Image (cartoon, helix red, strand yellow):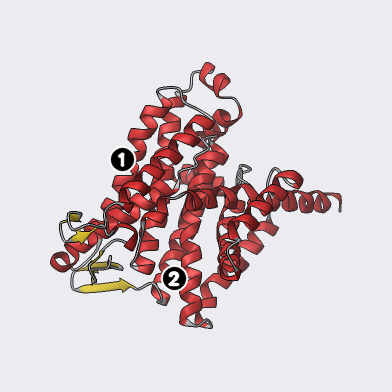
Amino acid sequence: MSQIKILRSLSNINGKNDLGNNYIFWFFFFLLLLLGLFSPLILSRYQILNLSNHITNIFLGLSLCLIWGYCGILSLGQSLFLGLGGYTYGIVGINLIETHGNTHVALLMGIIVPIFTAFVLGYLMFFARLKGVYVAILMLVVSLLFETFLNQTAGPGWFVGEAHLGGNNGLGRFSGVIREPPSLIFSFRENTIEFVGSSIQFYYLCFGLALITFLALRLLVNSSFGYKMIAIREDIDRTEALGHNIKLIQLIVFCVGAGLASMSGILYVSWGNFITPDTFGVYNNILPVIWVAVAGRKSLTAALLGSFFISWISQWLNEQGDYALVALGAILLSSMLFAPEGVIVKITQKFSVKLSKQ
């Protein structure tokens, strides 16, 4: 019986609450999987570094897709949790790396602190019946408060143990002395592995975590809990009238989203050994909204692809000049006018209709 239940649960990966529940989807899925597995073998170190950076964005995009696309909670401050995860990981890592020789505690704290922050904020918002634009604005305000505070921490009094907050110079930078946040280091008995940002090992770590996260979230959104999330998104009052504890569901989803966003922050800091207060700024909070909205906020698959490819496009636009955000805004406006459900979602739906007619 237990094996049957496990098989039924695993079948949720192919559920209808995300794009792709046919053989064509899984064919392209495994094609992209093979491409992701073997492409680092032919890429330069710089290309691997760049590719890993874009993969770290996937966790932030999936976090916003989960809370907004599936549970109807729009957050304009999702990078708050990315920044908290990154700063916490960096501060703890700088203080403990010499004595511990690994980043186990830093990694754990980098996840716990954002989730705890989300729990406090979520409890105050959802149990106070805040919803819609009020949640979105409040999250952005809190994130900007963190940015403003951290920008004022360049002076000599802003040490947390051995780690200096650094103001707008970045964590660990003070008066020419640099103590960078460490790369992820795992140790087991006498074996130690360091995941340097430009290494193939770091790329495969990010790739593997993104793959596991994506499949786990597909299981979640197609479970009974996932259907409750979608019910809240579609009609919150009716869902509550049916006896569901909507406040608790929203709080759980919000905390899970914070944990996912914190992974982006931790991997980003490990990738570049660097983080600044700009992480909490307007630009970095608007970017994931654009990724998810343009690709399709009600689909994990669309959010994953959008987070990766649109972040790559935004980087390319930044290299061309100072109009990246304007161009991305134009892309968002066009998609809202011609494909309000998301570009990837619309293309997939049209393809499915043509396929069904054949």
Labels 1 and 2: the sequence-earlier one = 1
Q: Visible in this render: residue 173?
A: yes
Q: Secondary structure at mark 1?
A: helix
Above or below: residue 166 compared with residue 218: below
Where's the N terminus, which quadrant? Answer: top left
Q: In this rendered view, identify the residue nearer to me: 190 or 133.
A: 133
Quarter where residue 158 is shown: bottom left
- Residue at the image point whose x is 43% and y is 27% from the top: 126
Q: Name the residue carrying label 2.
A: 203
Q: Amino acid at mark 1?
A: Phe
Q: Position of residue 197 (x, y in %)?
A: 39, 72
Q: Visible in this render: residue 19?
A: no
Q: Name the residue carrying label 1.
A: 116
| Spatial CA span between label 1 and label 2 | 29 Å
Task: Using residue 24 as the reference point, say whether residue 48 is left or right of it.
Answer: left
- Residue at the image point whose x is 21% and y is 63% from the top: 94
User: Which class describes the residues within 10 Å of circle 1: few (<14), some (14-19), or many (20+)?
Assistant: some
Where's the C terminus, which quadrant? Answer: bottom right
Q: In this rendered view, identify the residue nearer to me: 126 or 354.
A: 126
Above or below: residue 267 compared with residue 119: below
